[in-house]
Amino acid sequence: MKKIAWSLFFCFLALSLFASGKQEATQKVGPSEKVLAADQTLIIGTDAEPAGIDPHKSTSFSSVRVTKKIYETLVQTDANMNIIPGLAESWEIPENTTYIFNLKHGVRFHNGREMTAGDVKYSFDRIMNPENACIAKSYFKAVSDITVVDDYTVKLSLTEPYAPLLSYLTSVYTSIVPKEVVEENGDLMQVACGTGPFMLEDWVPDNHITFKKNGAYHISGEPKLDSVVLMVMPDESSRLAALRTGAVHLTTLGSQNIELVKNNPNIVLKSYQSKDYTFLGFNMNIEPFSDVRVRQAMSLAVDRSELAKIVFNGDAVTSGPVPPAFGKWALDVDTNDFFHQDLDRAKELLKEAGYKDGFDVEITVPSSYPEVVSTAQVLIQQFGKIDIRATIRQLEIGQYVDAWKKTDHQVMAGKNGSGTDPDRALSFFFNTEGSANVWGFSDKAFDDLTNRAKVTTDTDERVVLYLDAQKRLFELSPNLFFNAPMKYYFVRSNVEGFNPNAFNAEDLREVVIYE
């Protein structure tokens, strides 16, 4: 009998303590008296497998959404394109060709070692070494020397003023990495060790990627989540079903799904105008795409409004490589003839180029990006109106990225991000020496405009130069530019602290999950 009494006493005591603890937790949350879920694991439905996770080499959207959780940069961009501290707590520009960065103390890589100025130098040297084929090599074109002043100070010396440098240093492609991890593994395509809020725990190909909280993160109280799981779910309807049941907490979906969830109290919508755009890129090393008249004819065959309506349910704007989200830096494409369908002029140009009967073309697309596949499908119909007979070649994302790097295609449909500076949107992809210029495009006038803009520190002058560069680009049409869509995150209503914007779409540091 005594045993029963003692058991009842301990049960009552445990329940009392549990209730007390729960009440205390409720009070800590705030006036809404919501209760934090015991399991702070955020599950995200993602549309594609990453094609490697080396932040200096992996360029696909599916890769960047992984690397941005793991790695960090010297500086960052806020929602208004302002440069703010990152791993560098401050910086000085005593003259236009010298940048001195003062690093935050006590930042540790995921292997426990403190990050120092030597890691910044190693990372930037790695990027600048042409043998490494790092995507941001052209970002450092003006950098002549990187000096470790002391453990927490690094100096970049430039050969000439370089206006976009700070903006470029916000790119995940300039992440700070530890030398020993790179050298032990040869690269970072399958392993990861950064300073970011989350650490790579496991990666099961074609299934999921798990991140765990960086308990030694250098910003106190962040991240609030214990772990994040990216579930690879290429099929959009599967992601919607998983969201409805609560199997995933958030995912990206097309705007056509808005009507399907608008009356669901368990799902909220987070939207913003993206700085991404869809495009068609030409291999200008081969005929007929080496002829500007052919490229112009194909541009004039495209009805971009129809593309936006069919592919994005109308929730997209016509855009060049510098999208409207960039404000004054973006050329108003509605004033440019090549952004308006003109089938008669298109046929004339084809006839002048010697293709009055048209030609056959294969459009390479990434199979896991439905909006790109849909874009190509609409283009087939539109090109058919000027007797260009197009077919689609679908590749898995890794094969697609490889084909992009090697220019192993006739034409390639895709989507690009514009970065945080117009120079990234223009020089990076189209300057003769741009790291991502895989098209075989080279134009002295365009190079002159963008090269002058890089060294011009007067903002108004830079704006004029980049607007003129866009006009030149549209005339020569090495790519055709289509739509910048609205982006939609569909989120379970018990998830708070998630506020995506065009310049930081998936910051999870403040996210929490309630019961």
Image (tube, helix red, strand yellow):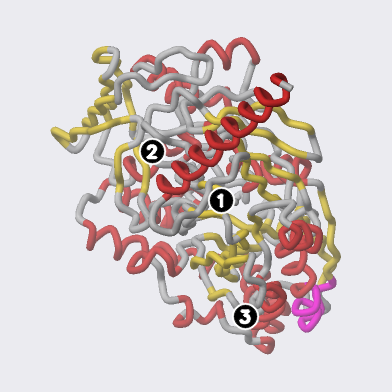
Quickly name the residue at label 2: 169
- Image-based side of 142 in relation to 436, left or right: left
Instruction: Give the vertical position of 431 relative to 212 (above or below).
Output: below
Residue drawn at (78%, 51%), measured in percent from left and top? Answer: 233
Q: Quadrant of residue 14?
A: top right
Closer to the camera in the image, 442 or 276? 276
Q: Can you see residue 301?
A: no
Residue drawn at (21%, 50%), measured in percent from left and top? Answer: 457
Amino acid type at mark 2: Leu
Residue drawn at (45%, 12%), measured in percent from left and top? Answer: 113
Please state the extent of the stretch shown in magenta in the rendering.
380-389
Closer to the camera in the image, 341 or 365? 365
What label does residue 514 carry, if any?
1
Q: Position of residue 74 (x, y in %)?
A: 36, 33
The secondary structure type at the circle numbered 1 is loop
What label does residue 475 carry, if any?
none
Closer to the camera in the image, 233 or 425? 233
How many numbered circles are shown?
3
Residue drawn at (47%, 49%), measured in percent from left and top? Answer: 431
What label does residue 314 carry, if any?
3
Q: Position of residue 490 (x, y in %)?
A: 62, 62
- Image-based side of 369 in relation to 72, left or right: right
- Image-based side of 461 in relation to 188, left or right: left
